[in-house]
Amino acid sequence: MGSPAVGRVALMSIHPEYADAILAGTKKVEFRKRPIADDVTHVIVYATAPVSAIVGAFIVENQATAAPSSLWRRFAKVGGITRHGFFSYFADRTHGVGIEVGEVLAPAEPMSLVDDLGIARPPQSFQYLPAAAAEPALAGMATIC
């Protein structure tokens, strides 16, 4: 199965427990309060403190925007989050987003934001990366699941 061409790439801050679950292939959906652009093909995963490193990436299969209750019914079994955690995250929201995780990639060693992407601070949620930074980072990763 060939990977899609690299389009726009998002760098996403994800708590280590969820980043680990994505890399392990058990979390197949990343939940967010707002969507990423439709032309994003890849998400680079930055595991927040205490890891504080780029630990992998995934190909975006699809994203669904819906009421939290609909997202939960659709993705509960593959969302990698408890019901309580999910509904706490989406408290006071009428809509949320489920970003479906496709092929998962990882570097041989965790990567640095500064050294490998030229970024001083991780994004609060996510940010789009210039191709000059994203493509070499993705090229240094291999498919793991």
Image (cartoon, grey):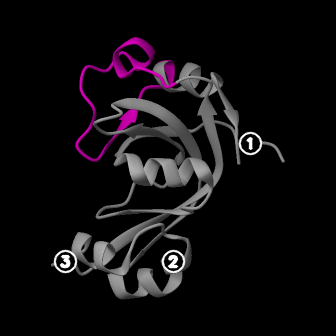
Q: Quadrant of residue 27?
A: bottom right
Quick check: 88 left or right of 44? left
Q: Position of residue 84 (x, y in %)?
A: 29, 79
Q: Is residue 67 visible?
A: no
Gap in Å between the C-alphas at discs 1 and 3? 36 Å
Q: Which residue is labeled 1 in the image?
A: 3
Vertical relation: 135 (above or below) 23: above
On residue 75, the disc is: 2
The residue at the point 24 percent across, 26 percent down is 121
The kind of residue tagged 1 is Ser
| Residue at the outermost right position | 1
Which of the marked residues, 1 or 2, is nearer the chain's N terminus? 1
Magenta range: 110-132
Q: Position of residue 79 (x, y in %)?
A: 49, 69
| Residue at the outermost left position | 92
The kind of residue tagged 3 is Ala
Please say if the residues under marks 1 and 2 sit with CB atoms less than 8 Å apart.
Answer: no
Judging from the image, what secondary structure is the residue with disc 3 in?
A: loop
On residue 91, the disc is: 3
Vertical relation: 111 (above or below) 40: above
Please say if the residues under marks 2 and 3 sit with CB atoms less than 8 Å apart.
Answer: no
Q: Position of residue 39 (x, y in %)?
A: 51, 49
